[in-house]
């Protein structure tokens, strides 16, 4: 998909948000995909990586490791990806991954910037020395300060927040409740749920009004823009806006996205 976007655009930055390079996808394969996209986009791509979610990764039948093991796997994966992006011949023998005489023949100049998803002080300490940029789904200022303390050099701190724009507020709330009520559970819950049935069970008592309290919904662009303020106050440099659902995407892009960006940048 990002390859198609790269072909159709010239300036917009591209990013995976985020890819798990450990279970469904071997890190050597992720490294080659990322290098190809960086070449196609002429340097506009950032590779966002994370330790994965059970929902996506369990399907290959390898089980679901504990979080400490998943982070160990991610460390090895990042080391492999970094090595391959040099264009050198790489052989790697780790606890979780092996790479045998691998080379990326069209390695992008300067490699590919890597953003790493973190959720607490342990993951920050582990990945700040390995990554270029921080990725998070909660406006936690401690993540930013911890990252800056452990990271050498400039980095971006990229947060994610959902919104539900619709000309009708009740429709926006109903859509957010139907498709994004699991957001209220937080990362620690969502990462371990293996099936859609698990998400449904975990959120069966979440009401539409509960969702409306945690996700900005409706046509008020000022309200939608203001919902990102906790990230700004926490020191994040970038915010990824997720417009919930596909029903109103075309209309959102045509009517609301431009004016919303103006309001966001004004903050």
Image (cartoon, helix red, strand yellow):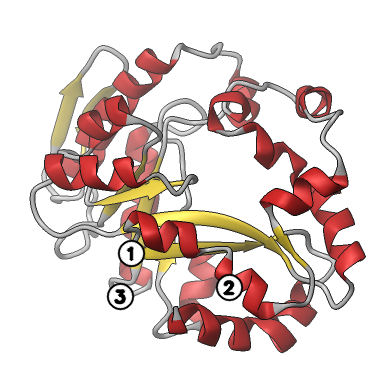
x then y, percent, for residue 123: 31, 29
For numbered disc 1, what is the local secondary structure?
loop
Residue holding disc 1: 237
Residue holding disc 2: 225
Nearer to us: label 1 or label 3? 1
Q: Quadrant of the C terminus?
A: bottom left
The answer to whether 206 appears left or right of 265 in the picture is right
Q: Residue at the spot x=73%, y=88% of the render? A: 255
Residue 52 sits above or below residue 231 on the image = above
Nearer to us: label 2 or label 3? 2
Q: Residue at the spot x=32%, y=15% of the render? A: 96
Disc 1 crowd rating (10 Å Cα; few below 14, some 14-19, many 20+) is some
Q: Earlier in the sequence, mark 1 or mark 3?
A: 3
Q: Residue at the spot x=28%, y=59% of the render? A: 156
Q: Nearer the viewer, residue 256 or 104?
A: 256
x then y, percent, for residue 15: 43, 60
């Amino acid at each position: 998909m990002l390859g198609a976007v790269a072909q159709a655009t010239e300036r917009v930055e591209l990013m995976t948000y985020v890819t798990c390079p450990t279970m469904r996808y071997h890190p050597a394969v992720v490294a080659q995909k990322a290098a190809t996209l960086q070449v196609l986009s002429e340097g506009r791509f950032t590779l966002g990586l994370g330790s994965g979610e059970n929902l996506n990764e369990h399907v290959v039948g390898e089980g679901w490791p504990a979080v400490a093991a998943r982070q160990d796997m991610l460390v090895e994966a990042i080391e492999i990806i970094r090595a391959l992006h040099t264009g050198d011949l790489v052989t790697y023998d780790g606890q979780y991954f092996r790479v045998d005489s691998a080379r990326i023949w069209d390695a992008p100049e300067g490699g590919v910037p890597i953003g790493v998803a973190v959720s607490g002080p342990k993951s920050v300490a582990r990945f700040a020395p390995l990554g270029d940029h921080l990725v998070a789904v909660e406006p936690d200022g401690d993540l930013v300060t911890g990252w800056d303390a452990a990271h050498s050099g400039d980095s971006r701190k990229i947060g994610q927040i959902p919104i539900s724009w619709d000309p009708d507020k009740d429709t926006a709330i109903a859509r957010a409740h139907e498709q994004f009520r699991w957001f209220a559970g937080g990362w620690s819950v969502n990462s371990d749920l293996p099936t859609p049935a698990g998400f449904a069970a975990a959120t069966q008592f979440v009401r539409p009004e509960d969702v409306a309290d945690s996700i900005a919904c409706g046509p008020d662009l000022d309200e939608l823009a203001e919902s990102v303020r906790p990230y700004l106050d926490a020191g994040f440099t970038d915010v990824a806006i997720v417009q919930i659902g596909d029903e109103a995407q075309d209309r959102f892009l045509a009517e609301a996205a431009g004016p919303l960006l103006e309001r966001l940048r004004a903050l």
